[in-house]
Amino acid sequence: QVQLVASGGGLVQPGGSLILSCAASGSIVSFNAMGWYRQTPGKQRELVASITRSGSINYADSVKGRFTISRDNAQNTVYLQMNSLKPEDTAVYYCKGTISLFTGAGYWGQGTQVTVSL
C-alpha cells in the first residue's frame, strides 16, 4: 500500500508565500511523475504543476512565475513553493504520484487546504 501525505497548507495573506510538501510512504514504488493539483467547490480538479523523474516540469499558466515545483527522487517527495499568492489560489491542493505517464494511473494524497485572504 502506498500513501502520499501532504502538508504545509494554511491561511496566508495575498502576496504571501507557502511551501507544500508531499511524501510517499509504504510500499516501494517509483513515480514517473509527481505533481500538485487543486480543486475548489463546484469545479474540476486542475493541474497546478508536475515534474517527471527526469526533471521535466509543467505549470498551469495561472501559476507560472509564482510557483516552483521540485522533487527528491530518493525520498519520493515533491514540493511546491508558492509565492505572490492570490485569493484565486485558494483551494484544496492534492499531490499525486503518477506510475504510468501513458494512462495517468497513480496515487493521490489526502489534500491540504490553502486559503489566501486578508
Image (cartoon, rainbow, N blue to C red):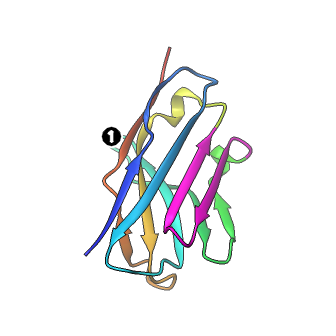
Residue 73 falls within the magenta-colored stretch: yes
**What residue appears at the point 50 percent right and 85 percent down from the top-left corner?**
102
Q: Nearer the viewer, residue 22 or 75?
A: 75
Q: Nearer the viewer, residue 3 or 87?
A: 3
Q: Position of residue 115 (x, y in %)?
A: 44, 29
State whether residue 56 is above or below residue 80. below
Q: Quadrant of residue 69 in the image?
A: bottom right
**What residue appears at the point 68 percent right and 71 percent down from the top-left corner?**
55
Q: Quadrant of residue 74 in the image?
A: bottom right
Most distant residue in the right direction:
65
Most distant residue in the front direction:
74
Q: Which residues are magenta?
A: 65-82
Q: Amino acid at mark 1?
A: Pro
Q: How many marks?
A: 1
Question: Which secondary structure dominates the residues rendered in magenta?
Answer: strand
State whether residue 33 is above or below residue 82. below
Q: Position of residue 78 (x, y in %)?
A: 53, 59
Q: Secondary structure at mark 1?
A: loop
Q: Quadrant of residue 91 in the image?
A: top left
* Circle 1 residue: 41
State whether residue 12 is above or below residue 71. above
76 with respect to 112 (left or right): right
